Image: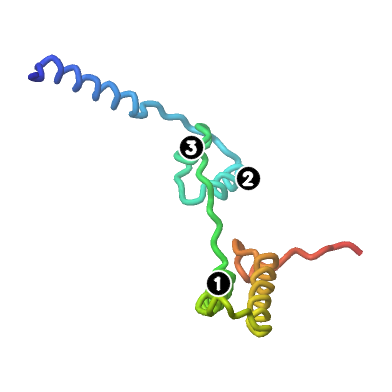
Amino acid sequence: MEKSKHDDQHRDRFRKDKNLRLLRHYCISVRLNQAELELLNNRRGKHKKGEWLRLTFLNHTPTDIPLVNVEAWKMLSDISQKLNRIAIHIDGKSKDSKLTNTELFAVRRQIVELRQHLLNADIWSKPDEGYAEDQKG
């Protein structure tokens, strides 16, 4: 089947109509006081003011991803590598041999250390942020 000239014209007109619908023709302006402007600037991050307002209005607010605590990730990576080495050692043993107390202790120590770091370390905060103190008393 050959494409007719009419089909091409219809397709071109559809593309133009679609592009015209996507173009933004209207502009609004907003007056803010100092506090509102500071709030807008704090929330918009790297986005332009108008872009952030439009995204927020359309419920497409961009989420800010917090910085990773690099020190905590290094610690967890180190513990993971140690556990992998222990697992390789245990896997390399014959099926008949039992785990020694030293091997069990090493596994337990690494699991306890991993658990402690997972519970205590906030991997999403910077190490120099500190923690809020209880002001009672």
Q: Residue beneath label 1, please?
A: 80
Task: Give 82 or 136, whichever is nearer the viewer.
Answer: 82
Give the label on residue 50, or none.
none
Vertical side of 28 occupied by 75: above or below: below
Give the label on residue 35, or none.
2
Tell me residue 113's x, y (percent). Answer: 66, 74
The quarter of the image holding the N terminus is top left
Question: From the viewer's perspective, is 61 left or right of 132?
Answer: left
Question: Along the polypeptide, which appears first: circle 1 or circle 3?
Answer: 3
Residue depicted at 66% across the width and 79% down the height: 104
Q: Residues under labels 2 and 3: Cα distance?
A: 21 Å
The image's colour scheme reads rainbow
Foreground disc of the pair 1, 2: 1
Please indicate, yes or no, whether residue 64 appears anywhere in the rendered image.
Answer: yes
Vertical side of 58 occupied by 134: above or below: below
Question: From the viewer's perspective, is 30 left or right of 115?
Answer: left
